[in-house]
Image (cartoon, grey):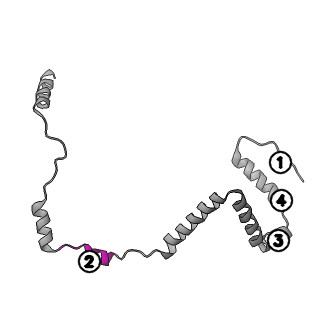
Amino acid sequence: MRRMPNSSSNPLLDLLISLYYLFQNTSFDSVLDLVLNAPRYYATWWIALYRDAPLHVLVETALVVFILWLTLIRTTVNTEISRKRSKLSKQEEEWLLDTWQPEPLVPAPSSTSVKSEINASRLF
């Protein structure tokens, strides 16, 4: 087996070199073994991970289940039904328009701030 050359300062290059050496020594039999025994390898890895970090497995499983729920199970809101429910009658619209009092965007100026602005404008 060849040894990897001294690592460079580029991590991507190091990764590519290590992948090259990994695939250079790979045979068809080892790839076939990996494909045929992948479920067993995955189960072994998952059980070891659960023994080492059960909270990590719990959080990760909860996130996967939540993503599956979001994409597959959750029903989307029908826009036509929601529009019919929120549609106001003409009388309600008129009442809202009549009773609406807009709030000022800026506070009303006080008499002292107006005097200071006048004095400041005289300086320039």
The answer to which image quadrant residue 97 occupies is bottom left
First in residue order: circle 3 vs circle 2 = 3
Residue depicted at x 69% and y 62%: 50
Q: CA distance from mark 3 to mark 2?
A: 60 Å
Badge 2 marks a residue whose secondary structure is helix
Up/down of 76 relative to 44, above or below: below
Measuring from the top left, give residue 39's x and y in whole percent. 74, 72
Q: CA distance from mark 2 to mark 1?
A: 69 Å
Measuring from the top left, give residue 69's x and y in whole percent. 51, 72
Crowdedness of circle 4 by 10 Å Cα count: few (<14), some, many (20+)?
A: few
Left or right of 8 on screen, residue 104? left
Measuring from the top left, give residue 33's x and y in whole percent. 82, 71
First in residue order: circle 2 vs circle 1 = 1
First in residue order: circle 1 vs circle 4 = 1
| Magenta stretch contains residue 82 | yes
Task: State which mark lies toward you, 4 or 3.
Answer: 3
Residue depicted at x 68% and y 57%: 53
User: Which mark, residue 33?
Assistant: 3
User: Which mark, residue 28?
Assistant: none
Mark 3 and mark 2 in contact? Answer it, CB < 8 Å.
no
Q: Give the position of the C terminus as an image quadrant.
A: top left
Residue depicted at x 84% and y 63%: 26
Magenta residues (range):
79-88
